[in-house]
Image: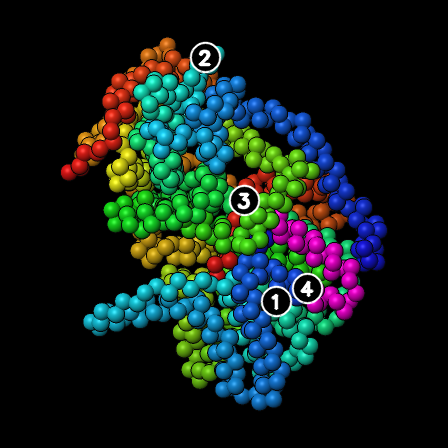
Amino acid sequence: MTNAIIKTLWDSRLWHGPAPKVILLLAVVNIAVLRWKSSMVEEKHANLTVGDVKALNQSARYDYTFGEDLLASWGSIPDATKQPLVVLSGMSQMYAINEPKPGDQRISEWLDDRLSLRGVRVYGLAAPNLCNEEALFLLLALLERPQTTPRSFIYGVCFDKFRNMDLRPGYIKFFLANPHLATVWKQVAEEQGERYPLAAEKMLKTFHDLHIEEDHDRPMSGTCENRLRDLIGAGVPVVAERKYLNGFIQNRLYTLRNSLLGIKNTSKRPIIRARYDMNRQFLELMMDISKQAGVQFIAYIIPLNPCAENPYILQEYKEFKTWLEDLAAARRVPFANLENLVPTEEWGMWMGGPDFKHFKGAGHRRVATKLEEEFGPLLTASTDLEAAP
Amino acid sequence: MIFTSYTYVFFLLVAFLLYWSVSVSWRKPLLIVASYVFYCSWRWEFGFLLLGVSLFNWFYGRWILLRWPSLPILLFGVAANLSPLIYYKYSDFLIRNAAAVAHWFGSDWTPTAMSILLPLGISFFSFQGIAYLVDVATGEEPLTQLVDFLLFKSFWPQLIAGPIIRIHEIRRQLENPHELDYEDLAVGCQRILFGFFKKVVLADNLAPIVDMVFLSKGAANVLDAAVGILGFGMQIYFDFSAYSDIAIGSARLFGYRFPENFNWPYAAASPQEFWNRWHMTLSSWIRDYIFTPLTFLSRDRPALGMLWLILAMALCGLWHGAQWTFVVWGVWHGFLLAANQTVLREVFPRPTANNSSQHRWKLLLGRISTFAMANLGWVFFRAGSLQQSAILLTSLFTLRGGIRPVIVRENNVLIVGMIFVAMMVTYSLHGVWTSWTQRVGLGYRVWATLRPLVYAFIILSVIVFDQEAKTFVYFQF
């Protein structure tokens, strides 16, 4: 280092200014984060799995990362060229087990146990608050290769997920690692623009956002930026744990918002019309794409806790169910309304009240049994699709 | 390389250490190389464009314009600077509009989209080149040393999104070597830190709320529209002023002082004052190189002044993007400025030492109305089309759809509202706070104690909220 830098380092203003104190404070925070890291991880896993930390195994019959790292779990999808594959997709109800007990399994696992006896494998692809744009993304990703192309795609439709949009970081990572998928995504958006304008516009925006990121990353940052973050993260716990910390803060803000505004799990929340319409188009698009690809699309309305008050406005929910039923009939998509399937005793508690959406192990088994009853012959029979009107 | 990325921080650190470690004669070449590395990290091919434009302007200013100063020679130089900008940025727009006109006359000409990739910062370095040639033609000494000129054109903090530096603002700094100073280091780091906070914590968190409103077609009601528009007004301010903060701070680390680009624009009490506080280097560029020459040319017909004002602002809008929405945004501001000087002259307060209660009321009303009008203008700036702008404005003014939001949620309304209130409170208190903390006494001691906590908080917020480095809004211009 030359005189200029050394001279500045010896400047008394530097040592009497805020810089040393800031460094000291950051060191203290880093030590604290290091100590809290394990409890933060546990809390996060608990949030994802509704208390079932031990269930975070890698039994590989479902996306064990819950959408956090699809690239890592993708390889565990059974090879569809060796035996027919059924994919069960949806939101957290698919994998979250309330008040878990040893031996409990998820819907996809129960279904796999039963159908594998008849030569069909079942795999769960679910993530918290999965929206229809993400479900479409999963469907298109599955169709990319024969090894992952399912015979049937069962989608558990959840009314309040029609308010969500955007792909989560774990899916974006997968997207960026599969440029061909991005091309297909854009192609679908361009082809379907007239029929599904809202969905197509959103798909193009998603593509555009990813494309910009790629452009600005090229040719250095894509790898350089990530490596640098990892490198700094190795020595600075706050950087390494920034996502956990972010989640922690967001969670606290969410709780604060709820308490300030008096929002409860059961507070009535009207649908967001623009998003609702967009998600409806995404669902219709999924049906079209499945049909084109020779994949049997199956939809069912997810069970809700009959004794828990839900946050839906009755009239809106009723309209949604009618719309979905009519849509399935018009498209000849196998459909079931499992809304009242799971009895009260098979639901647990969540945040101090009856959980209206996540059931216990028995509920998972019951849903799997019902799905087999309703759609079993379709899932195990040949995949010839009836011609739509 | 995005300013708010780890790569940039690393790049800046390495450049800083190298710059102050090498001998004085190597410092400028080092900064030029670093600037080209920065620029080429996006697409190396466009480095040649930047180099070509730089060499042309240096040669033209020093060897052509100086020897044969005449209007045609100057106009040729200006056209040469404009040609890459027109090709890369406006070809598609011009062809599309030509086709629309041709259709109108019955032609069935349908041109295919050209899909030309826009080089980063081309709008900025083209304007800088034009300003340089005009300044030389009007008596400014050209830079004699090529190394000085290359640095003037390519110095990375101002290369992508300004501030638009003019030769008289930096000549002395380029020609006289400077030494590393603690003051420069402290102020530079502080500006960079504030810039990171504005971008990562504020602008990037407003973006999804704004996107929600502007993405949905036709469903927004009055509250959605208001939240989207107000949110975008704040997003673009935080985003762009963050870029300027980081640019000014980065340059300061190397001993260069850039002009300010923002000065609390939303506190302006008239449209004219707004443009003296918002994107100051662009507004002075528009004034000096478009409006003033046009006014001078028609000095016998002062009534044309207002027309030139609107035209200059329309061009300012077009500079922001090759879309009619930007032109309408510019025209909107042109009309506001024209009204400010004519029909609404008595409505907006004039700069005066008058402290009467009547003046204070006028000031407050001026601020509220200027803020409202500037934000209404953002509708055109952000909307994807004129049709969408019309839908949002209709929702806003007709209360269509009731007042319960249908696109954003109540908590998003709260977030936007809270950031807005925080911004207003910060502005209201910053004068008092500055004078309180700069006086030796209790205020100074309190601030000295709080400052490390505030800086540590900002650093931690930036780390935690930065999930990925997002591009700056102004990168697209």
Asked whether B26 falls inside the magenta stretch, the response is yes
Q: Residue furthest bottom?
A: B68
Q: Which mark is residue A278?
A: none
Q: Residue at x 65, y 61 (%)?
A: B34
B144 horizontally vs A212: left or right: right
The disc, 1 or 3, on the residue closer to the chain's N-terminal end is 1
Residues at circles 1 and 3 in contact by the CB criterion of under 8 Å: no
Q: Are marks 1 and 4 on the same chain?
A: yes
* Label 4 vs label 2, nearer the camera: 2
Magenta residues, dominant SS class: helix
Cα distance in 3D space between marks 1 and 4: 9 Å
Q: Is residue B313 visible?
A: no
A18 horizontally vs B385: left or right: right
Q: Which mark is residue A103?
A: 2
Residue wearing tag 3: B468
Cα distance in 3D space between marks 4 and 2: 65 Å
The disc, 1 or 4, on the residue closer to the chain's N-terminal end is 4
Tell me where residue A254 appears, x and y as whole percent: 49, 30
Q: Residues within 10 Å of mark 4 (few under 14, many from 20)?
A: many
* Label 2 vs label 3, nearer the camera: 2
Q: Are marks 4 and 2 on the same chain?
A: no
Q: Residue type at mark 2?
A: Gly
Q: State which quadrant residue B180 falls in.
A: bottom right
Residues at circles 4 and 2 in contact by the CB criterion of under 8 Å: no
Q: Residue type at mark 1?
A: Ser
**Vertical placement of B260 versus A318: above or below?**
below
Where, quadrant-wise, is the N terminus of chain A in this rendering? bottom right
Q: How is the image coloured?
A: rainbow
Q: Residue at x 49, y 82 (%)?
A: B75
Residue wearing tag 4: B31
- Residue closer to the observer: A142 or A47: A142
